[in-house]
Amino acid sequence: MLEEASQHDDAWLEQEILNRGLLATHYPRRKPNSTEMTQAKVPHTAAQTLAEGEFNRLYARGLSSRAKAEGIKFVEAYRARYSENPRPESQAIIGKKFRPEEILEDLRNNPGVDTALGVPPGPNSGITIKLIK
C-alpha cells in the first residue's frame, strides 16, 4: 500500500474499495430497546470514510517518521478539512503538540479506528498533524 499511497490519494482508495467490492452491504445491528437483531444497511459513505481515515493514519505515520528522522521534537494537531459540526473531542485536540515517537507507537499499538492519543481522532474528524519547528 505504501507505493499506492505515494502515487494516489484517498479518492483512489475509495474507488478501489468500491470496485473490488470490499465492503459488505449490510451488517447486524440490535433493534432499539430489544435483544432482537436486524440487518442494517452499510452507509453509502462507508468507502469514503474508510479511505480518508486510512490515508490519514498513513499520513500521520509517515510525517511522524520524517519528524523523528529529522530530529523534529513535536508535531501539532490541526484541522485539515472544514467541518460543519465539529465534534468537541476533535476541537479539543487542535493545537496540541505530540512527540513523533508517541504518535508512531500509538498508531502501531492501535490498528483500528481509535487511538489512545486521539491522533487522528477517528473518522470524519478532519484533524491530522503537521510539522512544527
Image: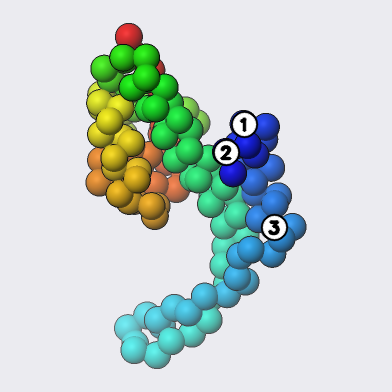
In the rendered image, residue 36, in percent from the top left (x then y), is placed at: 40, 90
Quadrant of the drawing holding the N terminus: top right
Closer to the camera: disc 2 or disc 3?
2
The percent position of residue 55, horizontal first and vertical second, equals: 53, 40
* Contact flag, marks 1 and 3 (Cβ < 8 Å): no
Q: CA distance from mark 2 to mark 3?
A: 20 Å
- The one nearer the camera, 61 or 52, is 61
The amino acid marked with disc number 1 is Ser
Q: Which residue is mark 2?
A: 2
Residue 102 on image: x %, y %: 25, 34
Pointer 2 and pointer 3: residues touching (CB < 8 Å)?
no
Mark 1 packing: few (<14 Cα in 10 Å), some, or many (20+)?
few
Which three-letter amino acid code belongs to the residue tagged 2?
Leu
N-term mark: 2 or 3: 2
Q: Residue at x 43, y 87 (%)?
A: 37
Position of residue 52 in the picture relative to residue 68 (left or right): right
The circle drawn on residue 18 is 3
Q: CA distance from mark 1 to mark 3?
A: 20 Å
CA distance separating discs 1 and 2: 6 Å
* Image point (57%, 75%), residue name: 26
Q: Tell me if mark 3 has few (under 14), some (14-19) or many (20+) residues whose alpha carbon lies within 10 angstroms of its own.
A: some
Q: How would you rate the neighbour count of disc 2 (Cα within 10 Å): few for under 14, some for 14-19, many for 20 or more?
A: few
Disc 3 marks a residue whose amino acid type is: Leu
Q: Is residue 72 above or below residue 125?
A: above
